[in-house]
Amino acid sequence: MSAGQARGSRRSPDAVHVAPVQRIRLRYAKRGRLRFTSHRDFARAFERSLRRADVPMAYSAGFHPHPRISYVGAAPTGVASEAEYLEIALAEHRDPAELAAVLDAALPAGLDIVQAVDAADCPPGSLADAIQASEWQLELAADPGQLQDAVTAFLREEVVLVERLTKDGRREIDARGPVLAARVAPAVSGAAAPAVSGAVAPAASGAVAPAASGRPAVSAAGSADPRAILTVVVRQVTPTVRPDDVLAALRLVAGFAPSEPARATRLAQGPVDEAASVADPLRKTGLSTR
């Protein structure tokens, strides 16, 4: 065999391509300082963890094969999340719980594998199809009453156009239409946020949403300034409406401006029902029990 033929055989797609025999869906979190990692940073760290954990990945065909990884709806850089999702294709069967443990051990602290499920045990359809909405929690340095007034004014509107700087320049997006629900609560350190009287649901429905989320509200311990928690459920659209777009809309319609940058955390992603409750996309039945 000539040198040229040898090089050609090494580049042969069939020499590397491995068909998947199992697909695993993973939920992971970005916590603490690791919230500042970009999606590209996470992807590099995750692929390194796959190699360290000796995960038998299936690879794409072609002259530049890649491990079969499907990422879904990554959170913006600087935003924490408890509910990021991806799917990997394996060339050999693995127990999902054991796979989650070895991958979590291989990742940096703060990038944490929360859940692993065989795709065959998930609802039918692709993972991307299951991501219909996100639930966001924003901690704000603001008076809860003033925030409630701003949210009420915002939800009365049908359309609120805000500007976003994109790679193609500035463009206007509607920050109101995709918002399915919003509720306000005072931030209470180390305790679940109590209900705020008059918390509101989308204006179109005319219903009143419960303000208590049942999840811990993060707050700065010992802070003398009032702090509030805004929880919003936003439908997945293109372009995606992000927490900073909602804050820009509150400033536009009500002049609301917190005294310091918001601390945002994505609590959930998945299917959404008529009550604006976001379900676990890895479960066939029932809402998430986060």
Image: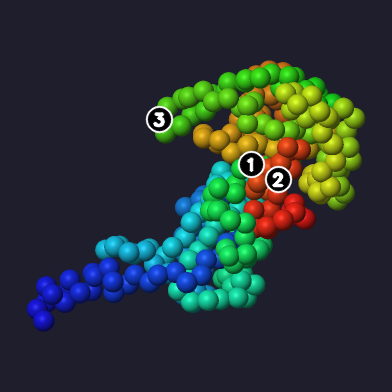
Which numbered disc flags the more N-terminal residue, 1 or 2?
A: 1
Local SS, label 2: loop
- Which residue, given by chain and number where applicable, does mark 1 sit on? 133
Q: Amino acid at mark 2?
A: Val
Q: Is residue 174 above or below residue 196?
A: above
- The residue most toward the left is 2
Q: Is residue 112 visible?
A: no
Q: Residue at x 62, y 20 (%)?
A: 159
Q: Is residue 83 visible?
A: yes
Q: CA distance from mark 1 to mark 3?
A: 26 Å
Local SS, label 1: strand
Q: Amino acid at mark 1?
A: Ala
- Which residue, given by chain and number where applicable, does mark 3 sit on? 168
Q: Residue at x 50, y 74 (%)?
A: 55
Q: Residue at x 51, y 34 (%)?
A: 239
State if disc 2 and disc 1 touch (CB < 8 Å).
yes
Q: Local crowd at mark 1 within 10 Å, few (<14), some, or many (≥20)?
A: many
Q: Quadrant of residue 105?
A: bottom right
Which numbered disc flags the more N-terminal residue, 1 or 3?
A: 1
Left or right, 151 with respect to 189, comes to left
Q: Is residue 143 above or below residue 40?
A: above
Q: Nearer the viewer, mark 3 or mark 2?
A: 2
- Which residue, given by chain and number where applicable, does mark 2 sit on? 278
